[in-house]
Image (cartoon, rainbow, N blue to C red):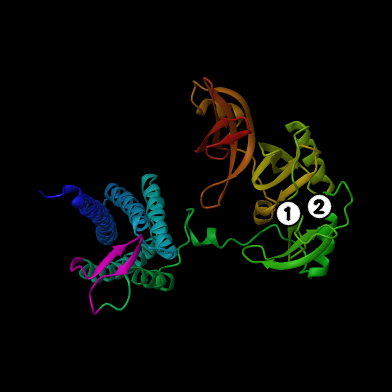
Amino acid sequence: MINLRKYLPWAAGVFLVLVFVLVFLVMQSRVTEAQNLLEASYQKGFFNLLEQVNNLNLLLSKSMVTSSNQQRIVTFLSIWHQAESARDSIASLPLGDRDLTYTQKYFAQMGDFAYSLAKKALNGMEIKKEDWDKIQKFRDTTQDLNKKLRELQDDVAQGRINWEGKRFALGIGKNLTAGMADKFLKLDQKLKEEAPSITYDGPFSDHVENIVPKGLTGPLINSDEAIKIAGSFIDNPQNIKYDISLYGTAKGNIPAYSLSFSKPGQNSPAIIIDVSQKGGHVVWFLNTRDIGSSKLTVQDAVNKSRLFLEKRGFKDFEATGSLTEDGTCVITFAKKQKDVIIYPDFIKVEVALDNGEVVGFDAMGYYTNHMERVIPAPKLSKEDVLKRINSRLSVKRIRKVIIPDPSLKEKFCYEVDAKLGADRYFIYINALDGTEEQILKVVETEKGTMTM
């Protein structure tokens, strides 16, 4: 008689091995399925981009030959839509740590410029020769980009390139010397060098990105002068004798000396501050101290911050909003010129609600935009404005303001503070021609008032 007990350990071992093999095969199958799904999604993103660039090439060509204003509007809006879709397709590709900044910017500019031309055509305005020259440049560049993407399509279609782990990787093709992401990076650099520099009325215009600050006045200063200015600018109610040192320079639109304030015997900075190289203006500072429990109200913070500004020469500013969070209150102030609020000239002041100390200051917007403006007399009265807005609105206040549009052009408007039921809105009516420039919805939260 066979002793079954003798074989039980061996059988159990075989059974466990079979179970492990089965689990491994199931998991491997699922991993393969997931990889295939990823591969399919990456393929879809690439071929969507290919189709969108091809469509853009055709639409740009069509826009240049149509003689119908209505057809122009449709074509320009289609370009805008396709360009935005191309940006979405690029964002869906597994580029790893590669950043296709110039490709994204190219499609953003193209779409936004086409949208601005659609608005021109819709309002019966002439599309000038320089506008068509820009469309021609976009068409030539897109045509070349379309050709380069078609060359990549062959490698993808023949399976010589795989897309793995959220980054492009080489497939088994022996003739391929670079991954797909590197090829896209080369296209991105090519666009940086060859794409047209476009200036127009839109948020992606080159003049918006390369804005020259208007509010900096005075001669260049050295770092020693910057240290003296910084020391007298901060709010220091306890008269702490900080050690101030230069730790770097800030570049960008406002080159500045970057300074740190350290308490005696401490290495880590308590305050960091930027002082502009031109004119020695404090651009911003931040006090990193711990904030205690709140004892002051928002109105206390507004009063404290207004006094802080006035003592430092910032007079005739209107508090336009506040946000309370983590024991501090950030108050936004806008410059007033006579009875007009200049929204582009804004400063933010952060006040600690435990003792009223100003722990933050940001005047980047002010020094970027500030200048003495020639404000014309409005051609509409407040009564005219009331006739133009929706009759269902309950108007609380009307005041004169200057607001920036997306292209940073300034608009002289009436700001209508109105409610529809429980909802509050700011409606901006152009004070010169009555155009409804903008509508913002006001959202009241526990932290403060925000607009959307």
Is 227 placed left or right of 428 in the picture? Answer: right
Q: Residue furthest left?
A: 1
Magenta region: 157-175
Above or below for 3 versus 46: above
Point 27% across, 57% down: residue: 35
Is 153 placed left or right of 291 in the picture? Answer: left
Neighbourhood count class around disc 2 (C-alpha, 10 Å): few under 14, some 14–19, many 20 upward: many
Is 71 placed left or right of 431 in the picture? Answer: left
Q: Amino acid at mark 2?
A: Ile
Mark 2, residue position? 234
Residue 310 on image: x %, y % = 82, 45
Residue 308 on image: x %, y % = 81, 44
Residue 283 on image: x %, y % = 71, 56
Residue 285, disc: 1
Point 69% across, 55% down: residue: 367
Above or below for 310 versus 233: above
The secondary structure type at the circle numbered 2 is loop
The reply to whether the magenta stretch includes residue 174 is yes
